[in-house]
Image: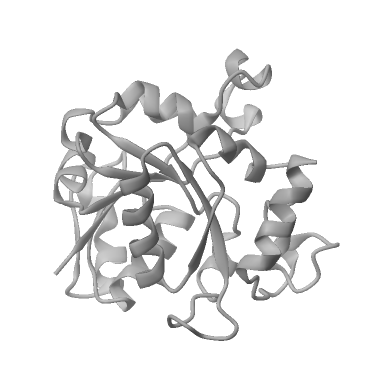
Amino acid sequence: MATLGLIGSGFIGGTLARLAVDGGLDVVLSNSRGPETLADKVAELGAHARAATPAEAAAAGDWVVVTIPLKAYTSLPREPLAGKTVIDTNNYYPQRDGQIEALDDGSTTSSELLQQYLGDSAHVVKAFNNIFFKHLGVLGRPTGAADRTALPIAGDDADAKRHATELLDILGYDVVDAGPLAEGRFYQPGTPPYGAPYAQNPGASFAEQKAGPAPAARIREFLAEARG
């Protein structure tokens, strides 16, 4: 059975863990506070979940999701992530992460910073960063469903993007390939594809609304709007 490793087990990580178990995957969760702090979450998820250290979760995962605050990205274990498809859910929030000049001036993106830190042997794909965790938890549908929702991904390695697409399919989502990793800037906070497409009324505050499906064509329209 394939395994999803999670470095970070908060709102997004916990939601992905549930989707993964429901999709037939084993899950290894981790956080910065130690495996013992995840006992309740593991018990809730059942026999296909266990807790470990970040390095152990990275080593165990066929895919590894990094879902920690951006300011902590240099704490990630490089060696066990070598050769892995690393799915980055991160966004840059200066009020939480502090000011990062290269992000403020637009010369790079948060996922490119992660790729640079991990080195060429890891293959970063940006995904899951533009959807509210409550919407993520309920919008998944079986492959081919008429109301299936799509999520954008970006990455520099074609094989890693194909691998990430396989994971999203297992979790219940279609994919829109937004291009190389730098194109992840077009679905970060403050852009049209961030949050709004997955709310029933995209014109209002998405976090206060019920989820609504967003097919691939709709996500492409929001990305086109973001690119201007």
Residue 205, image x and y in percent?
A: 79, 59
Q: In which quarter of the image is the C terminus?
A: top right
Residue 218, image x and y in percent?
A: 70, 65
Residue at screen point 47% across, 36% down: 69
Identify which residue, 4 or 120, lies in the foreground.
120
Q: Which colour scheme is used?
A: one colour
Q: In this view, does 16 lie above or below 211?
A: above
Q: In this view, does 104 lie above or below 161?
A: above
Farthest residue to the bottom: give it. 146
Residue at screen point 42% across, 40% down: 68
Q: Quadrant of residue 81?
A: top left
Q: In which quarter of the image is residue 158?
A: top left
From the viewer's perspective, tell me whether residue 122 is left or right of residue 174: left
Q: In this view, does 145 lie above or below 40?
A: below
Q: Quadrant of the N terminus?
A: bottom left
From the viewer's perspective, tell me whether residue 32 is left or right of residue 125: left
Identify which residue, 216 or 124, lies in the foreground.
216
Tag count = 0
Residue at screen point 64% across, 46% down: 187
Farthest residue to the top: give it. 101
Q: Is residue 182 visible?
A: yes
Residue 204, image x and y in percent?
A: 84, 62
Farthest residue to the right: give it. 203
From the viewer's perspective, tell me whether residue 59 is left or right of residue 119: left
Residue 213, image x and y in percent?
A: 64, 75
Q: Is residue 65 visible?
A: no
Residue at screen point 57% across, 40% down: 184
Identify which residue, 56 or 126, lies in the foreground.
126
Q: Quadrant of residue 109?
A: top right
